[in-house]
Amino acid sequence: MKKELKIEGMSCGHCVMHVEKALKELKEVENVEVSLEEKNAIVTLKYETDDAKLKETVEEAGYDVVDIKDI
C-alpha cells in the first residue's frame, strides 16, 4: 500500500532528509521517497495505518501536510 502526502514548508535538501527520517522511524513504514520539487512524500506501508499518524509525524518534524491520498 502506498500513500502520497502533499507537504508544504520544505525548502531545501535538509528539509527533505528531515521528513524522510521522521517517516522512516514509524514501524508501519517500509520506504519513503520525498520530493522537494513535487512537494510530496510517497510512503510505502508494511500494513494499514491511520492517515492522522502520518500527518502528525510530518507536522511534528515542522512541516504542513495539506493532503493525503492512496496511490
Image (cartoon, rainbow, N blue to C red):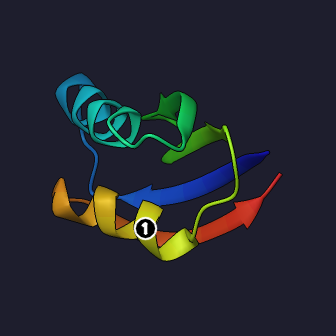
Q: Is residue 23 left or right of residue 3?
A: left
**To which quarter of the image does residue 6 belong?**
bottom right
Q: For this rendering, which residue is in front, 28 or 54?
A: 28
In what quadrant of the picture does the N terminus appear?
A: top right
Q: Is residue 27 left or right of residue 49?
A: left
Q: For this rendering, which residue is in front, 2 or 4?
A: 2
For the residue carrying disc 1, how many other residues have a C-alpha within 10 Å: few (<14), some (14-19), or many (20+)?
few
Disc 1 designates what residue? 53
Please give the name of the residue rendered at 26% of the width and 23% of the height, measured from the top-left corner: 13
Q: Is residue 43 left or right of residue 66?
A: right
52 vs 69: above or below: below
Please give the name of the residue rendered at 69% of the width and 48% of the height, measured from the top-left corner: 47
Image coordinates of residue 70 in percent, x first then y, are 79, 60
Query: Is residue 38 at all visible to an observer of this figure?
Result: no
Q: Dot 1 lies on which element?
A: helix
Image coordinates of residue 21 in percent, x first then y, are 28, 30
Image coordinates of residue 71 in percent, x first then y, are 83, 51
Please give the name of the residue rendered at 22% of the width and 34% of the height, measured from the top-left corner: 18
Residue type at mark 1? Lys
Query: Is residue 5 at all visible to an observer of this figure?
Result: yes
